[in-house]
Image (cartoon, coloured by chain):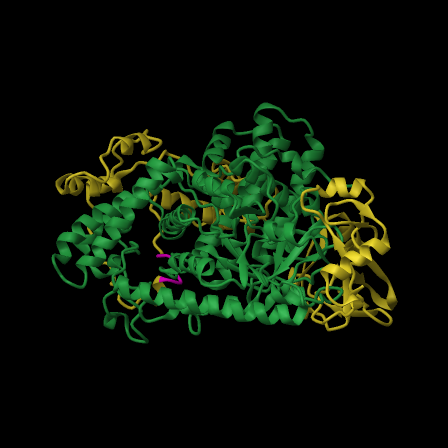
Chain colours: A yellow, B green
Amino acid sequence: MVDFTKMTVAELRKEAKELGIPGFSLMKKAELVGVLKVAHAEKSEDALKKRPKDEPKAGKVAKDKTAAKPKPVKKKAKAAEPKEPAAVDDAAELEQEPVVDAPASVREVTASKYNLVVAPSIPEEHLGLLPESYGQDRLVLVPKDPNWMFLYWELAGESSKKAWATLPDGKLVLRLYVEQEKGAPELTEQEVDAGWKRTYIRTRDGDHSVAAELRLKGPGGVFVSMVRSERIPVPVARIRPGAPKFTVVPLNISLRKLREQGYVSGGSYVDLHGRVIDEDEFARLVKQSVPGSKYR
Amino acid sequence: MPQGYFALVLHAHLPFVKHPEYPDFLEEDWFFEAAVETYLPLLEMFDRLEADGIPYGMTMVVTPSLAAMMSDPHHQQRLRRYIEKSLVLLEREKAFVGDDPNFAPVVEFYRDRLSRYLDAFVNRYHFSLIEGLRHFDNLGHLELITCAATHGLLPVLLSQPEAVRAQISVGASEFERHFGRRPRGIWLPECAYTEGIENFLADEDIRFFIVDTHCMQLANPSPVFGNFAPIYTPSGVAAFGRDVESSKQVWSSKEGYPGDVNYREFYRDVGYDRPFEYIRDFVQPTGLRKQTGLKYYRITGDVDLSQKQPYNRQAAMERIDAHAGNFMFNRELQIKHLNGQFGRPPIVVAPYDAELFGHWWFEGTDFIEMFFRKSAYDQDVYECVNLSGYLQKMPLQQVSTPATGSWGDKGYFEVWVNDKNDYAINHLHQCAIQMIDLVDQFPDAQGVQLRALNQCARELLLAQSSDWPFIITTDTMVDYAHRRIREHVLRFLRLADQIRRHQIDEKWLGHLEHRDSPFPDIDYRIYKRMS
């Protein structure tokens, strides 16, 4: 294995270019080394001949105590060599194969044949690693459950660069604006490590929605805002009582047409056939269909 | 008029797995196993029920990624190969077990069954399971519904609403392409819902979806009939809630029916039991063993796999009879009780993963068939309905909005959003952002550029599949799942970069189109920026 760490950036780039690694010209040395290691590993895998993945369908076999360890098998040259390198599909070949009614002797011959189906040759792609950065300032909240929200960010865009230039010794703080179901919104602030990219924040029953912001804070209360998230609702875990309203939505009329007719569920009414009716008529309909007129 | 309704919903889904670059690829077996153990048995069941005039009202989701495999010649030919190969193995097995009174009948049972499936697959359905499903959908008892294009977890994708719109819109148009009509219902992937998603459904005139029990109970305002009537969201789209009781009887491997000692044992397979030289041609080309689908033992009890007893088909079928009868009896009680409580016919909605029946619980499809037969002849409390059929009968319902949640472990999104898999979320969002930008930049692409943009849309959708984070969390085929996320994101990024630089590698694009090939009719402009 080549020791990429001893190569210069120019040499690494040259190598990366040859391997067709995207975005190599923007990469720092450490990234280049990482990407090239992977690309080379893939290449040598390639050289060893592509092999299907080894794992059994786990979750099923994992529990299988009888699963015998396979003996190291000497590969038959026959089984490893593609018979027809250009064949794209086995369809035509299989088409001519007698299926159910073939005598057993024919089957013995065909059994191993089934393992020789040849795939089209698809060149290795050398895709490399997932990007570390997309060159943007972004802060995103994703709901996980009523108690936790996932938060990730990336500070690689213009406004964060400006902020660091303005306050080079500033501290990165995460501000959370939590709107409550009832009462005043809450604001919390915590210092975060600039190296973090993903974390989870705690939410509580009664929290309605959360928005986040990353700020760079300098001495004496000076700060620069770097990026804000959208406001995301917190999943609820409570029963929400309320006066029930009923409506009819006839399945045979499209929602678009119903809307064009001025239909609004819970507001204006149609009968079981989609005809617009007034509120009193509708109340009678509900009474028939939903026992106990207390529901209306 | 019946006292209530029972609505079985089967969710048939597998992620799109296609590896023409390998002659044999283990993860492709997911589709072949499900086809042989679940989809073909279901088609056979529909056929028998139709022939006997049994009203088997039920709903079945065929996800667009599964439909894409069902209609792909690659999978069709390999599925045929898979069944043929099993039949070849069974010829050998016949000689191997000889006249052993325990195993000879089991081998014969499998030979008969697989020969029938092969015959139906090739001669009746012409390699297309879609054709079979469409046939029964047209007859009216079975109602097929769609799902988001690649089973993306929509609440996580919602930071780019265009990404959610694309998942749903492609889901609806793919359904129409395969089944010849617009879908009336949708299965939200993992039942994952958050307020606002219903508006994307309304735009496609999709009329109903299904949420988990707690999302219904916590709906706003609280539904007066709980899970036993749908609610209309303010968009006019109905939401049905999952019933816990009927679910548990089938789902739970401990208290549920599938754990009965007479049912087939899943983990004891010929692929692991036979001498290696004998089985070599029927396991992985690398020499590792794998499941062949030929399993000759019954669950027996809480004993080591080596202590399992031989499978007896007749004994298993006797249990099916008892369990289907028990399930029917419990539904009668439940529905009578609810009718008394509400003074109105309730609906009990029982959704399951389709692959539970047949693949995991081998006799599961027989259970469904027996349940429909008994429901038709042995009771008159409830009627089995598909969900559209119910909405036609009962169009007046309460207006309410379901609460955020999913049917995953703990009821929210933890399975797909946790520290093992959350790294992917940023990449999925970023690719969606770039996709939307690309539509801005190239609103009227033609030729190769159009092909490349459409392929970008496919790569993005494939990366978004909820199966990858799920697999990572459940710790099964973790490397494969990481690989799929990485490959689709990187293919997207490279292709997007080539499009922007006007330097599309056409040969590579051709390979991508061949390999990542679902949704042939996709139009990248589905990602047009929303104002």
Depth order, front residue of B91/A205: B91
Question: Which one is nearer the viewer's eye here, B491 or A271?
Answer: A271
Q: Residue furthest bottom?
A: B302
Prevalent SS, magenta region = loop
For this orientation, the residue located farthest to the top is B447
Q: On the image, which quarter does residue B301 sit in?
A: bottom left
Please determine whether, in this image, residue B402 is positioned above or below residue A271: below
> Looking at this view, is B297 or A140 the one in front?
B297
Q: Visible in this render: residue B382?
A: yes
Q: State which quarter of the image contains the C terminus of chain A.
A: bottom right
Which residues lie in the magenta part? A56-60
Residue drawn where x is 69% and y is 30% of the image: B443
Left or right of B139 in this view: A160: right
Residue A207 lies, with reference to residue B85, above or below; the image says below
Q: Is residue B370 left or right of residue B150?
A: left
Residue B479, percent across and down?
44, 55
Task: Give the residue at x 36% y 51%.
Answer: B33
Q: Is residue B3 above or below residue A252?
A: below
Residue A268 drawn at (x, y percent): 83, 50
Residue at figure coordinates x 26%, y 66% from the top left: A66
Estimate the x, y position of residue A127 in percent, counting from the top left.
50, 43
